[in-house]
Amino acid sequence: MKTSSLPAFSLFLVLLCTAAPAAAEKLFIASAANFIRPLEELSSIYRQQKGTTSTLSYGSSGKLYAQLLQGAPYDMFLSADKDRPQLLYEKGLCEAPFQYSAGQVVLWSRYTYPASSSWQEVILQGDGRIALSNPDTAPYGEIPMRTLQQLHLLQSLESRLVYGQSVGQSFLFARSGAARFAFIALSQAISPEGQKGHYWSIPESNPVEQWGCITTHSRHADLARDFQSFLTTESTRALIRRHGYL
Amino acid sequence: MDYTPLILSLQLAGVTTILLLLFAAPLAYVLVFYPMRGITFVESLLGLPLVLPPTVFGFFLLMVMGPEGVVGRLHQNALGSPLIFTFGGIVIAAMLHGIPYAVQPLKGTFAKLDRRLLESASVLGCSRSSAFFRVVLPNSLPGIASAAILCFAHTMGEFGVILMIGGSIPGETKVASIAVFEYVEAMRYQEAWQLSIALLLVSYTILLAVNLLERKNHAA
């Protein structure tokens, strides 16, 4: 670099550093992967109503929980289970948990099977891999895993299981055809991508109670509380139900 | 403590290194000694794994190697079994991802070879392929060794691509890096520590052995 251009370059660097806009009030929400679609819609409605934008981060509940234990800077945690928010609450890392939805596990495939078959018939007839989210970290993997155990199906199916890191990856495995089936959330199955295949409900498995909480280290706790009450209004609940939640 | 993931990583790295060298050595030979038109396009293509994020690379592989993908279907038709979510599948992925780590050092060594050796071989009636095996390879052993070490090390550390296409099947595709990741995610830190330390020791031992061998070669 020529020496004459050095002052100009330094000025440019200084401007670059100071040009960042003053941090607007923004909510940082970490959500379980199954809740992506309703949450994106809700956050855009909320922005129109209240002018507050939110940054959304997704992963398996277990992964986000581990990050929160290490002080991840989320204002709100939307888990796909009841236990993890409760544990955070007991550790003093979040405020009292609240339930925001209840999801359902379904079996999904891009391939066609006789319409009258139940999920058990389909999965036992068909061969090929079955994608399941990591049961240690993802409630949407833990619940079908427990169902397979209770129905004594695990032993015959175990060799066909492949594990996704979250319910999003499990869906990708089945959507791409790499796996023949996937246990996913109903909300994914009725999404535009999910409608490119078929799903079977699993009456034997419990609903997935989804709880959330506001972190105690949040610097926008007031905003977060406002978003929490927004999550529980009747019109929000109706929207969440339209996405395949109870 | 379950050390299967560590053994699997070593197997993956070993198999990948051997197969990749068998494939990369002739390729590097052709690139160096028989450069044809448009070679720059091929070389840029071969360098892609250095630049592409493992997630992108893995996503492409998932789409191509699945039963609906071109490669996956060919494999299924030829051998009657799927390719994705198998040990063979992650070997192929690791090989493709490791190409530049094998080809670059090999090209470097081949380019430094004394051309007169090859000319003499040709004059003495040696064909191109036998010159490759009888002249080029024996004179390139240090370069082959460093290519092998790079491939092995890179494959031991392979994570993103296998995360995308492995499916984390114990004993099949759940290698050490994936197992550590899952232990950490599940907050099983004790197991994460044990496996990480084991991985560290194995890696260090391999590097140490390599460096000691190199020293001995230099001294000799």
Image (cartoon, grey):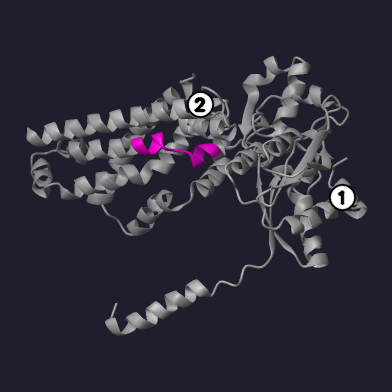
Residue at image coords 22%, 48%:
B108
Image location of residue B173, percent across then percent down: 52, 28
The percent position of residue B47, horizontal first and vertical second, equals 38, 52
Say if residue B174 shows up in the picture. Answer: no
- Residue at image location 70% in from the left, 18% down from the top: A154
Which chain contains the residue that carries disc 1?
A
Query: Within 10 Å of the Cα at label 2, are there few (<14), some (14-19), or many (20+) other Cα atoms?
Result: few
List the residue tagged with mark 2: B190
Magenta-colored segment: predominant secondary structure: helix
Residue labelled with disc 1? A232
Question: Residue A200 in magenta?
Answer: no
Q: Please give left or right for residue B118 compared with residue B54 in the image.
A: left
Residue A154, above or below A185: above
Instruction: Name the residue located 79 percent from the left edge and 33 percent from the top edge.
Output: A105
Cα separation, mark 2 vs mark 1, equals 40 Å
- Quarter location, residue A112: top right
Residue A201 horizontal side relative to residue B36, left or right: right
The three-letter code of the residue at mark 2 reads: Gln
Please check whether the numbered discs 2 and 1 fall on a single chain.
no
Residue at (80, 43) in percent of width and height: A187
Nearer-the-camera pick, A61 or B106: A61
Callout 1 amino acid = Thr
In depth, the one of A123 and B216 nearer the eye is B216
Residue A152 x %, y %:
75, 14
Query: What is the span of residues highlighted in magenta in the rendered image?
Result: B153-163
Q: Is residue B205 visible?
A: yes
Q: Residues within 10 Å of mark 1 (few under 14, many from 20)?
A: some
